[in-house]
Amino acid sequence: MSTWSWISRAREKKALELYIEHASKIVSIVYHALIAIKAYKEGNWEKFSEEWRRVFDEEREADELKRKILAELAEGVFHPIDREEVVRLAITSDDIASYAKAWCRRISFIKENELPSTLIDKLIEMANYVYEAAKIILEASRELLAGHRSKVLELANKIELYEEKVDDLHVDALQEVLLYCNSAKTSNCMLAKEITDTVENAADKCEEVADVLRSIALLR
C-alpha cells in the first residue's frame, strides 16, 4: 500500500470513528422520540415534555457531530469516492434524527390525549421499528470500521426489512388518520397525517443509510 493510500485509510478510520459516535447519538434520539409517543398515549404530558426536550437537545448535539465529521473529511486526504460516501452517510443518518425531532414537535402541537389510541398504537409500532433499524445502523457502522464487509451487508438487509414493516404499518396508520379526520379539527387532522408520514420518512432514511453502508463496504 502506498503512503498516500495509508494516510487516506487512516483519515477514513478517524471519520468512521466520529460517525460511530454520531450514530450512537441518533439511536438515543430515536429512543427518546419513541418514549415520547408512549408518554403521549399514557396521557403523561410531563413525561412527554421531558422526552421532547431530550430529543431537541440531543438532535443539536448530533448536528455538531455531523459538522465534525464533515470538517474531518474537508481537511483530510481521502480518495474522492470514499469522501463522497462518508459525507452521504453522515448527512443521511442525521436526517433520521431530524425526522424523530419533527414527529415529537408535531405531537406537541396536539393537546394531550387528542389523538386516538388506535393511531398512537400504530405510531408506536412504527417508531419502534425505526429504533431497531437505528440500532442496527450503529452495529453495522462498527462492523464497517472493523472491516467485516459480509457482516455489514447482512445488517444492511435487516435494516431494509424493518423499513418494509414500517411501510406496511404506514398504510394501516393512514386508515386510522382518515377515521380520525371525520371528527377532528382540520389542523389536527393535518398534523396527524404529518406525524404519520414523518415516522415513515425516518424509516426511509434508515433504508438510505443501509444503502450507503452497503456501498462503502463493497467499495473498500
Image (tube, helix red, strand yellow):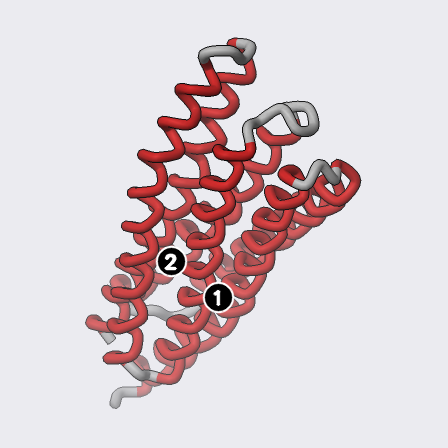
**Percent coordinates x, y for residue 44 in the rendering:** 74, 40
Can residue 215 be seen here? The reply is: yes
* Residues at marks 2 and 1 touching, judged by CB atoms closer than 8 Å: yes
Residue at the image point whose x is 51% and y is 58% from the top: 71
Residue at the image point whose x is 32% and y is 50% from the top: 165
Q: Residue tagged by mark 1?
A: 19
Q: How many marks?
A: 2
**Percent coordinates x, y for residue 193 in the rendering:** 44, 25
Q: Amino acid at mark 1?
A: Tyr
Q: The N terminus appears in which quarter of the rendering?
A: bottom left
Can residue 11 be seen here? The reply is: no
Q: Residue tagged by mark 2?
A: 89
Badge 1 crowding class, 10 Å Cα cut-off, few under 14, some 14 to 19, many 20 or more, is many
Q: Is residue 216 left or right of residue 110?
A: left
Camera-side residue of 138 and 7: 138
Residue with the most extreme right position: 46
**57 over 192 or under it: above or below:** below
Q: Is residue 202 left or right of residue 147?
A: right
Say which label, 2 or 1, has the lower sequence index.
1
